[in-house]
Image: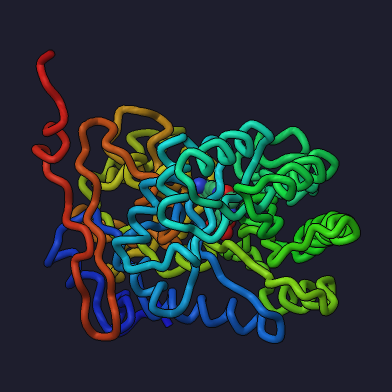
């Protein structure tokens, strides 16, 4: 479920994308709710047979409409800021299903989490543990703690999104984690809740997860030997999706491996998928503004569209490849085009060297854009951020209106 062509027209579920572009303009992010729901069910089924909780990594796509619907499905949430906690609350999410990750939690964010009674702080350093303990004492409320362990596992992914290597800023090595657990255990203000890791994003193989879980279990067993009991083990997110012909992570094989490695231990298994829940559900719709066919040999065919790197930064930042398809086939001659945005940077492209038949005014769909698309968008070049639309069956709703220039200028003064 998601995207398919009907009479040559690319549709999101029962809705032609062209209809959405006419109704709300471009650029616009479109999400298929049924696609998200199916992906949630797929992960849930893959983990069947073990007590588990899916904590959606809000950072991937934090639109309230998606959070509210995932909440209704029973999802928990992995947050990394007070802002994300606020979103989860607004979406009706239960703080008792929230885990809080991140290396730089501010005092304000820690206080907010303590007061809400979130399920666990995924603590990433000795200093953070000390600050958390001090804040709990001050606020007179206990906090539940998990230590983020860096298992030094190579997840074989883009260096900017690998997080489980010992050189990375995330988590603490197992030996230090042991020490932090002893401290947390001895503290009257902290409750030891679990253990967690997150080794990276867009991981295609099961093996790194297996190795990470094994490392975490080794530590959990050591803790158990000291009488320090955990209630959950969280292996983070990072489940790879297919942007092109590469294989997605085999969720069934992942589930099998995790079940086998956990081996009947009385621990709730937690996962924090972001991308794999929402990437495939989203497209970025953009219109061709100008065509600049190569004026001479050695030049490139340039198609300038109305979406830019401020809308989707993944190609510029991670050399990411997103499929680009015409919303309606125009039957014209194929050429190899660079699909670029209006921003004054050479790095402002959505796709390079794609064989397409293009006319000015054509609509294009940039595929697999539901994760880290809108969420990483900005106002660079004073461009209002795109609208967001959620499709469900034969209907669609505007779930974030397009920003206006006055939205952008409102916080500024002349000093
Ligand atoms: N848990 C933690 C602690 C994380 O840091 C992340 C992502 C996730 C879960 C979710 O990972 P996922 O399932 O989405 O792979 N902007 C990059 C991805 C950055 C991922 C950051 N952390 C991109 O567009 O590829």
> How many badges with numbers are in the image?
0
> Left or right: where does residue 155 sit relative to residue 351?
right
Percent across and percent down for residue 255 are 72, 76
Is residue 145 shown above or below 302?
below
Image quarter in which the N terminus is found:
bottom left
261 or 189: nearer the viewer: 189
Going 41% across and 51% down the picture, which residue do you hit? 115
Percent across and percent down for residue 174 are 82, 45
> Left or right: where does residue 146 sit relative to residue 72?
right
Going 77% across and 72% down the picture, which residue do you hit? 258
Percent across and percent down for residue 87 are 33, 56
128 or 362: nearer the viewer: 128
> Left or right: where does residue 146 sit relative to residue 54?
right
256 or 116: nearer the viewer: 116
Image quarter in which the C terminus is found:
top left
220 or 50: nearer the viewer: 220
Residue 88 visible in this rendered orientation of the protein: yes
Percent across and percent down for residue 414 are 10, 16
């Amino acid at each position: 479920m998601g995207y398919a062509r009907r009479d040559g027209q690319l549709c999101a579920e029962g809705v032609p994308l062209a209809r959405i572009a006419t109704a709300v303009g471009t650029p616009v992010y479109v999400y298929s709710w049924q696609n998200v729901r199916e992906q949630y069910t797929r992960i849930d089924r893959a983990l069947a047979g073990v007590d588990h909780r899916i904590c959606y990594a809000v950072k991937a796509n934090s639109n309230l409409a998606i959070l509210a619907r995932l909440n209704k499905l029973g999802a928990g949430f992995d947050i990394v800021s007070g802002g994300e906690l606020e979103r989860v609350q607004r979406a009706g999410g239960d703080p008792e299903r929230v885990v809080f990750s991140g290396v730089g939690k501010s005092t304000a964010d820690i206080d907010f989490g303590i007061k809400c009674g979130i399920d666990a702080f995924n603590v990433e350093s000795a200093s953070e543990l000390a600050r958390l303990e001090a804040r709990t004492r001050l606020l007179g409320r206990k906090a539940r703690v998990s230590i983020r362990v860096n298992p030094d596992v190579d997840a074989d992914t883009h260096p900017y999104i690998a997080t489980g290597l010992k050189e990375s800023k995330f988590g603490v090595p197992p030996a230090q984690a042991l020490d932090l657990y002893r401290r947390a255990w001895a503290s009257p203000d902290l409750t030891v809740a679990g253990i967690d890791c997150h080794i990276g994003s867009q991981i295609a193989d099961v093996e790194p997860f297996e190795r990470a879980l094994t490392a975490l279990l080794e530590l959990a067993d050591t803790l158990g030997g000291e009488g320090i009991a955990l209630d959950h083990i969280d292996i983070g997110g990072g489940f790879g999706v297919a942007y092109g012909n590469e294989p997605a992570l085999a969720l069934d094989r992942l589930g099998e491996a995790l079940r086998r490695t956990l081996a009947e231990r009385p621990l709730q298994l937690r996962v924090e998928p972001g991308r794999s829940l929402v990437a495939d559900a989203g497209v970025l719709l953009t219109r061709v503004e100008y065509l600049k066919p190569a004026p001479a040999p050695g030049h490139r065919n340039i198609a300038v569209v109305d979406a830019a790197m401020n809308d989707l930064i993944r190609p510029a930042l991670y050399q990411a490849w997103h499929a680009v398809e015409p919303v309606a086939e125009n039957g014209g001659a194929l050429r190899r085009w660079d699909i670029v945005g209006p921003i004054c940077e050479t790095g402002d492209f959505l796709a390079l060297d794609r064989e397409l038949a293009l006319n000015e005014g054509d609509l294009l769909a940039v595929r697999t854009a539901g994760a880290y698309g809108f969420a990483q968008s900005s106002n660079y070049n004073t461009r209002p951020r795109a609208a967001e639309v959620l499709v469900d069956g034969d209907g669609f709703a505007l779930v974030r209106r397009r920003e206006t220039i006055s939205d952008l200028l409102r916080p500024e003064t002349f000093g």
